[in-house]
Amino acid sequence: VAGAGHTPEGDRLTIRLASLDDAPAIARISREAYAEFAGQVEPPFRALTATPAQVRQEMRRHRFAYVLALRDGWPVGHLRYRVRDGSMHMSRLAVLPAYRGQAIGRRLMEWAEQEAHRLGVLHLRGEVRSVLHRLLEWYKALGYEATGTRPLSGVPHCLTIIEKWLDEHPASARVEPDPADEQVWLEETPIAWELLHPALAELPGLRAHSPSRNSR
């Protein structure tokens, strides 16, 4: 799968938590990473219109955290997450087009798992566009399980919920979201995992949501 390889030897990649001062870089990465899907994927990704002010609001008001991947000090990718109800909720994973296929996305996911362990959180959760069947299989290979679907902007089953437990847990264990707190989560952009794997842009399911691929 494209994007699942190893970072080239000698590549100086660092990963760290972002601060409010990083909001402009985060917004830029979001817009550039999602730009190829503008007008082609419905519902559209909110990342396309990300601004520094919105990023700061997410961090301050909604308690999202961002983690940045930097190549030689230059921000090239990010992952958004927050811990709620005993789970780490992950979203908006993105890598700049020029830096894809070098395991940066995988490194960000590994960082998230390590951070979850550090915080004593054993359950990770995200949402993937349901049309991306091959990508869902890719995440199953990483230990994630598809456990259900959710609508988005009136589209039934638009998102597939993926979950992973980092350690052994009872078979009956499930972390149920608080309905009163779920609206903000559902209104946020789903995880655009396909941005890490350019080959997935040609999936039939994705093309079905796209008026044309000739404008890419």
Image: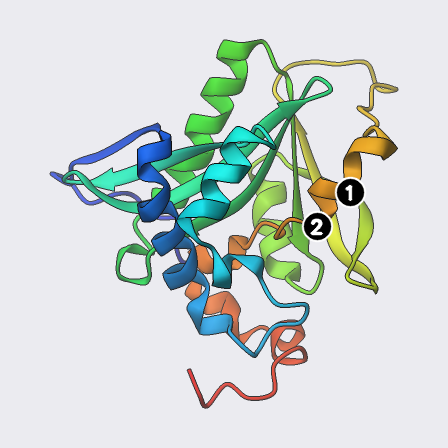
Q: Is residue 143 above or below residue 215?
A: above
Q: Is residue 216 left or right of residue 123?
A: left
**Which residue in the protein does label 1 denote?**
183
> Residue at coordinates 45% horizontally, 46% vertically from top-left?
53
- Number of the label disc, if any, that sits on residue 187: 2
Q: Quadrant of residue 36?
A: bottom left
**Which quarter of the image is occupied by the C terminus?**
bottom left
> Residue at coordinates 81% horizontally, 51% vertically from top-left?
150
- Number of the label disc, if any, that sits on residue 206: none
Residue 62 visible in the current orientation: yes
Report if the CB atoms under discs 2 and 1 are less than 8 Å apart. Answer: yes
Q: Is residue 194 left or right of residue 32?
A: right
> Residue at coordinates 51% horizontally, 74% vertically from top-left?
38
Q: Is residue 52 left or right of residue 21?
A: right
> Residue at coordinates 43% horizontally, 51% vertically from top-left?
94
Amino acid type indicated by mark 1: Gln
Residue 95 visible in the current orientation: no
Q: Quadrant of residue 121?
A: top right
Q: Quadrant of residue 15?
A: top left
Amino acid type indicated by mark 2: Glu
Element under disc 1: helix
**Which quarter of the image is occupied by the N terminus?**
bottom left
In the rendering, at what x and y percent does residue 102 appear?
30, 49
